[in-house]
Image (cartoon, rainbow, N blue to C red):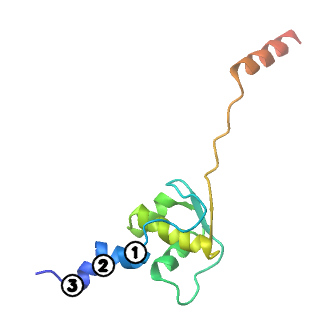
Amino acid sequence: MSNPGRDWEDGTPERLYVITGGRSGADSTAPLDLVTLIIAKSGPKPGMQPEHTAIIRLCQSPLSVAEVSAYLGLPVSVVTVLLGDLITDGHVLSRPPVAPAKLPDLALIEAVIDGLRKL
């Protein structure tokens, strides 16, 4: 026999539906993917939804959407809805990850080496 209170905490579809208010996509204009970094602008406010509070506490240092999802134990689709709410309300900022530096063109490197040899 299952415990009804326990089912609610196990990430059942009903619980996830309630957490997101039945929404399936983020309302924010900021595109969110797995590597988008999230950082809290301030601490949690009284009366916030527990999941919003947890996200703000986690994101005092930048975390990716995938990391937030993993730490909360919630699907990425649910986390993006919650993050969209927080972005819209100005509680968190999102930014794309820092791109790795591009290496200069190989021909340019060879030209520099040739120039140095001629000195």
Q: Going by the image, does 73 lie left or right of 47?
A: left
Tell me which residue sits at (15%, 80%) in the image. 2
Q: Mark 1–mark 2 contact, CB under 8 Å? A: no
Farthest-out residue, bottom: 47
Of pointers 1 and 3, the one earlier in the residue sequence: 3
**Could you tell me which secondary element the residue under label 3 belongs to?**
helix
Q: Position of residue 90 (x, y in %)?
A: 65, 74
Q: Which residue is mark 2?
A: 9
* Crowd class of label 1 (few under 14; some 14 to 19; many from 20; radius 10 Å): few
Indicate the amino acid at tag 2: Glu
- Quadrant in the picture for the N terminus: bottom left
Q: Nearer the viewer, residue 34 or 60?
A: 34
Q: Which residue is mark 3?
A: 4
Q: Position of residue 73 (x, y in %)?
A: 38, 67
Vertical order, 67 against 109 (above or below): below
Indicate the amino acid at tag 3: Pro
Tell me which residue sits at (42%, 78%) in the image. 21
Q: Which residue is mark 1?
A: 22
Q: Nearer the viewer, residue 39 or 116?
A: 39
**Foreground disc of the pair 1, 3:** 1
Of pointers 2 and 3, the one earlier in the residue sequence: 3
Vertical order, 106 against 18 (above or below): above
Of pointers 1 and 2, the one earlier in the residue sequence: 2
Indicate the amino acid at tag 1: Gly
Residue 100's quadrant in the figure?
top right
**Could you tell me which secondary element the residue under label 2 belongs to?**
helix
